[in-house]
Image (cartoon, rainbow, N blue to C red):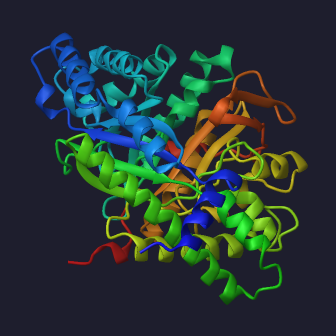
Amino acid sequence: MFNQFDVLETIDMIEKEHLDIRTITMGISLLPCIAGTAEETAQKAYDLVCRRAENLVKTAKELSGEYGIPIVNKRVSVTPVSLLCAAFPEKATRVGRALDAAAKTLGIDFLGGYSALVHKSMADYEKTFIHTIPEVLATTERLCASVNVGSTRSGINMDAVSLMGEIFKETAQKTAENDGIGCAKLVVFCNAVEDNPFMAGAFHGVGESHAAINVGISGPGVVWHVLKSIPDADMLETAETIKRTAFKITRAGQLIAREAAKRLNAEFGIVDLSLAPTPARGDSVAHILEELGISTVGGHGTTAALAMLNDAVKKGGVMASSRVGGLSGAFIPVSEDIGMIEAAEKGVLCLDKLEAMTSVCSVGLDMIAIPGDTPASTVSAIIADEAAIGMINNKTTAVRIIPAPGKEVGDSVNFGGLLGRAPVMPVHDTDSSKFIGRGGSIPAPIHSFKN
């Protein structure tokens, strides 16, 4: 039961500390839409998405008004489109554009699921499908794409890793007039999950129901404010405080998710309890780490501080809900976190440090701008490094990187809104082309064999 103090505390979190439901995402199975032609499949997909999610935006607004909790984004994720288009992969863009049109009709922010799962091997139709990604992202507004190139159970598909370096480069060039914004809607995963509500990597897994509601909560500002109230606490007390805070945040998310699912005739999927920052000051994961005692995020001690934060958030969230899922932890996207942006501009936060941080937090190298002339093989090598962290540590890792066309170190990209801005960060001037050119696959680690 909530007492008067709990109610007042929650009101403070919303009004002063940026507490919100970052996204309510409806996952929709499009398997019933598979037809004999791309045109028929595209039309069925459009119709089904519009029918299932017809009241998504309306319901989110109603819930926000009734409970007083802002719901920032309304989104849809769908069955990986490569599966729908296996018979006509070269025409997959028609389905992608139909889904983008559905997103506009519904008034949602993003639609995810223009995805391929090639973590063990890559069939011909999957390879053809992946080659359509740059074109479809350049000709749509709200569609998001993702590719899973590895897993702890299967290893890393290095042929897919090599291809994705080229895809990032091509996508950046096709959207060069907007600083390569197409790459901001493209994610490469290792150990991708089927119930992720966050973009750009969300897709609706084949093991999911016809429709599910997955909610992504947020609250970096809430955690930051509570840490400011205990400046001299030791690490154990600090972790306990973060746990209690995450518990309260997660309960709010579960309340919204259950009620939304009931009203939208969908299953309650999961609550993703990730701390997802925005470019707004006071809503930064980096500032949490600095409040813990790191003068500038990226300095020595940052990885340890992030590990403690991520673990405490997970422990508090798991106590609050039996349906925790998605990615759940702390996001560290450079362009979407004002503290990360400022640390990168100072030169304290670098690509190598970000990679180290991803070993202990959610997802991975996220929304990072690099020079536009970076070779595709270097982009692939960055993906391979991050996938290896995910594979060995049995966790989800990802890369969302922007080889900014015509930009070099010292320049910046600016996407506006939630995607924010980012300084162009340096990469090592070394050649990884022979390593990437070997192809094949990196075998699964020994600890993956658990049967």
**Quadrant housing the C terminus:** bottom left
Frontmost residue, 394 versus 314: 314
Residue at left 61%, top 39%? Answer: 401
Q: Is residue 372 visible?
A: no
Determine the image quadrant of residue 173.
top right
Asked if residue 242 lies left or right of residue 160, the reply is right
x, y percentage for residue 119?
Answer: 34, 50
x, y percentage for residue 266?
Answer: 22, 44
- In this rendering, is residue 194 above or below 377? below
Frontmost residue, 348 versus 197: 197
Asked if residue 290 lies left or right of residue 401, the reply is right
x, y percentage for residue 286?
Answer: 74, 58
Asked if residue 13 lies left or right of residue 300, the reply is left
x, y percentage for residue 414?
Answer: 74, 28
Q: List the single residue furthest toward the front.
A: 4
Frontmost residue, 134 versus 436: 134
Q: Is residue 316 visible?
A: yes
- In this rendering, is residue 121 above or below 167? below
- In this rendering, is residue 225 above or below 106? below
Determine the image quadrant of residue 174.
top right
Residue at left 56%, top 77%? Answer: 244
Residue at left 29%, top 19%? Answer: 95
Q: What is the tally of numbered marks visible in this picture?
A: 0
